Amino acid sequence: MQHTTSTNALVDAFSNIVGREHVLVEGEAHEDFKDPYWKEDSQKFQPLFVVQPANVEEVQETVRLANELEVHIWPSSAGRNYGYGGSAPLVSNSIVINLRRMNNVLEINEEDGFALVEPGVTFFKLFTELREYEIDLMMSVPDIGWGSVVGNSSQHGYGYTLNGEHAEAIVGLEVVLPTGELLRTGHGAKSNSPMWQRHKRAFGPAIDDLFKQSNFGIITKMGVKLEPSPEKMTVGLVWYDGDDLEPFLTKIKSLVQNDIIQGVPVLFDSPRASDVDKPIQELFHRAEAGNLRHATRWALRVSIYGPGEVVEVKEKLLREAFADLELITIDLSTYDGDISPEQVDDVEHLVPVGMPTMLLLDQARATFGEDMGHIEFAPRVQFDADEYLTVAAKIQDKAHSNGLFVDILTGLHKKSIVMFGMIYFDRGNEEQIKTAHRIVHELVNEVGELGYTEYRGHLSIMNDVAKGFDFNDHALHKFYTTIKDAIDPKGILSPGNHGVWPSNFED
Ligand SMILES: Cc1cc2nc3c(=O)[nH]c(=O)nc-3n(C[C@H](O)[C@H](O)[C@H](O)COP(=O)(O)OP(=O)(O)OC[C@H]3O[C@@H](n4cnc5c(N)ncnc54)[C@H](O)[C@@H]3O)c2cc1C
């Protein structure tokens, strides 16, 4: 697709909708919407400029204009998708439609436990509103809180309290389609329905999932489930310094499956510095000093929520479960459900009690310097020690043999686990960036051979991951293409996002 309009003329055209001051063409504001961890001088993944609409009507007009002028657009909400490409588009010179200005919490319903938010609402903002209006609901937050509820949840992101699988906590969407038409999902499609945020499915096919990790629409409103604040919360770490993961993981699986520990517990894998080659050892010591690694071989972040008596019994069951394992230390704290962030006695407890923080990013920057960058390799695998160790070894060997430090944190579900492999590099060092991306490409294929695939990935690997879905001659991706062809044949909206392209795509 050939733009016939000059950049200046495009800026003018979009300024007519949102105002010139809300079109960011260069300078710091524009820099904020590139991939923060990508090569400085690369032509890939570069936004042409950034347009920031103020409301749904402006989003619709922006989309219609993009169709008219045949320019690619790429939406972002807070635009903090660090580790996966930030706010950057896959196809360079796309215009980023950033929704930070649409940052209203439109409704919070305490009785039925939900909120309706605009895309620019960050985890910090939702938390602040819950506290400001003394609403007795607990939310789930990712490890860093400056991202948006919409951006994070629509990317299948994770928090760690109840409802920590954020994509599952979505109840009802409002979406601007690639034509500019406005659609609401589920009960929201019935104009007078009080049910939009109260029940996901309505009548006929449920299509909410089609707008997650996709390029079928721009989400302009999202319902999100919230839980009643528990009377008590017990959170903390179970440290295990044994080398054999199997007995530890078997016990953890039983605790997760029986709801003794709740939310999304996280397993931290800290190989010993002596197990890696000399050049990497220094990185390991640094990571340990900076609290990016734990001092024991394994650590498990746990949470229990509920009435005081129930929490007490579950804590007892947790302690009993590990009683016959040596080299275990259990370090837990119990808080009231309405505690304030200042009353939390360990900053590491903020996330499991549902309070947004920037701790992990601060720790990573303090450890590896302000020029720290990272890319995720994040496969979902079976909840099984052998499977975990096979995949973890591939990730660790690949990173370490290429001179890079990787930190694997694993979120635990009842029937599966998701391994967040954070591969760190120096973003001032082009060779290291290239190496980190190459490693992830290789891992997609190698771990793919075991039948596993990433739950989410950087722009640079989306096509490779998508190609792995090969059943019946890639029938699933053919179906996505059929939808894309029907609703956006020129690929105006986010072409290539998660490997979905129209069949006759022209850049
Ligand atoms: C140290 C560190 C720790 C992290 N920990 C976590 C963690 O615990 N859990 C986790 O999930 N992530 C984590 N991340 C990754 C990331 O920071 C978060 O997921 C963040 O919330 C995503 O940014 P965002 O919400 O601003 O999304 P955005 O950048 O706004 O959006 C991301 C992508 O989603 C799509 N999108 C966004 N908005 C819309 C819309 N309105 N309509 C349609 N598509 C849209 C676009 O493709 C966009 O590029 C971490 C990152 C770092 C650096």
Image (tube, rainbow, N blue to C red):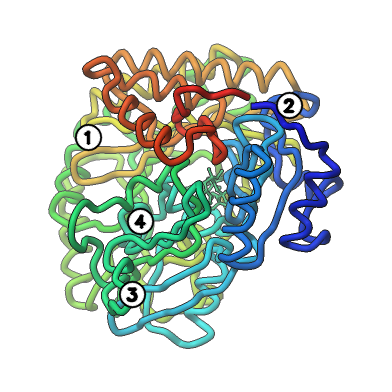
| Dot 1 and dot 2 residues touching (CB under 8 Å) | no
Image location of residue 189, percent across then percent down: 32, 66
Q: How busy is the neighbourhood of tag 1: few (under 14 within 10 Å), some, or many (20 plus)?
A: some
Q: How busy is the neighbourhood of tag 2: few (under 14 within 10 Å), some, or many (20 plus)?
A: some
State how many labels appear.
Answer: 4
Q: How far apart are marks 2 and 3 (CA)?
A: 47 Å
Question: Which is more N-terminal, label 4 or label 1?
Answer: 4
Q: Quadrant of the N terminus?
A: top right
Please give the residue where the numbered disc 4 appears in the rendered image: 164
Q: What element carries label 1?
A: loop
Question: Which is more N-terminal, label 3 or label 4?
Answer: 4
The residue sitting at 43% across, 71% down in the picture is 116
Mark 4 or 3: the one toward you: 3
Image location of residue 239, percent across then percent down: 36, 45
Please give the residue where the numbered disc 1 appears in the rendered image: 383
Question: Which is more N-terminal, label 3 or label 1?
Answer: 3
Q: Is mark 2 on a helix, strand or loop?
A: loop
Please give the residue where the numbered disc 2 appears in the rendered image: 39
Q: Is residue 285 visible?
A: yes
Q: How busy is the neighbourhood of tag 4: few (under 14 within 10 Å), some, or many (20 plus)?
A: many
The residue sitting at 50% across, 72% down in the picture is 127
Q: Is residue 239 visible?
A: no
